[in-house]
Image: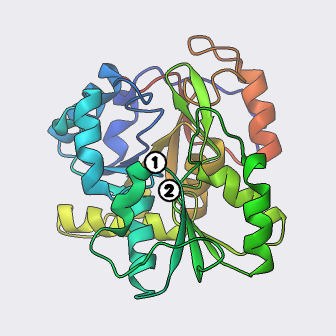
Amino acid sequence: MTDRMLSLTEHFSELAPRYDLVLSDVWGVVHNGITSWPDACAALAHFRAEGGTVVLISNAPRPGEKLKAQLDGFGVPRDAYDAIVSSGDVTVGEIAERPGEPVCHIGPARDYALFDGLDAPRVSPEEARYVVCSGLFDDDTETPEDYRPTLDLMLRRELPMICANPDLVVERGDRLVYCAGALADLYGEMGGKVLYAGKPHPPIYERALAQGKALRGDATPLSRVLAIGDSIRTDVTGAVQLGIDSLFITSGIHAEELGGRHDPDLATLARMLDAARIAPTAITRTLAW
């Protein structure tokens, strides 16, 4: 996939005129789980000021509207985006299609908003008809292996799992913590049935493109849509599967593998892309106008 030398695009302004709609990842692009990255926020705001539309597309396991307050707290200005679409939105839709069915929730209490206003009694895995996994109960100390006994029980009962966040890990400051995707992948490897609500799977992109159409008044041709993200597994793969261009951020979750945030080893990145049999349209260290 990488039969040419990789190079870095230093400024988003070099690419922006090609696109009308940006689907931007959130965690790893506009903030790191603790604070916003001002240059990235300013770049998206500049794109909007010149007529572009920005839909933030996040694997966060909470409804998009709930994320606005969190982004406010991180210092992400609202002029950096037009709308938010999350895997939590897709998950809420899936729960709504199962009215009255008892559900086991694996994840922290901060994700209870997934069930707000829905007929979805939360029960133990012994009583559940299906499972919603939004993360680990304590991602500061636990690993997916701590959940193997619960996953064994779920497998014996043939419980399907809805994964509300397909990410394996996410940045929290200067470290990585496990996400729901790590549990979902383990359950799938054990033989369990998993429905993934977020990137790189189609449902979240369908919702994001519909939101873009509502905002712009017409469907944007896929050739004029750009995905921005820091994950080869979710952001770049999802863009390629959808048939849109992508801008890969090297300073996100792959930064340590690439030798640091400021001077990524492009030869290492080429090998990673070859292994994934995929390539982004452009590569940059951080999003900056």
Provide residue 203's location: percent of width, then percent of height: 48, 70
Q: Quadrant of residue 209?
A: bottom left
Q: Is residue 126 left or right of residue 252?
A: right
Tell me which amino acid carries mark 1: Ala
Q: Are marks 1 and 2 in contact (CB under 8 Å)?
A: yes
Instruction: Return the residue nearer the eye: 174 or 125.
Output: 125
**Mark 1 — residue?**
227
Query: Is residue 224 among what the camera can see?
Result: yes
Q: What residue type is disc 2 on? A: Ile
Describe the element under mark 2 as helix, strand or loop.
loop
Q: Earlier in the sequence, mark 1 or mark 2?
A: 1
Element type where label 1 sits in the image:
strand
**Residue 139 vs residue 163, the one in the foreground:** 139
State the quadrant of the C terminus. top left
At x 68%, y 79%, the residue is 159
Instruction: Indicate the quadrant where residue 149 lies.
Output: bottom right
Calculate the distance from the C-alpha at mark 1 to the C-alpha at mark 2. 7 Å
Identify residue for label 2: 244
> In the figure, 87 relative to 48: above or below?
below
Query: In the image, which is nearer the foreground, mark 1 or mark 2?
Result: 1
Where in the figure is residue 74, as x and y percent of width and height?
A: 29, 28
| Category of crowding for the residue at label 1, using alpha-carbon neighbours closer than 10 angstroms: few (below 14), some (14–19), many (at least 20) | many
Using the image, tell me which numbered label, if any, was put on residue 85: none
Nearer the observer, 164 or 24: 164
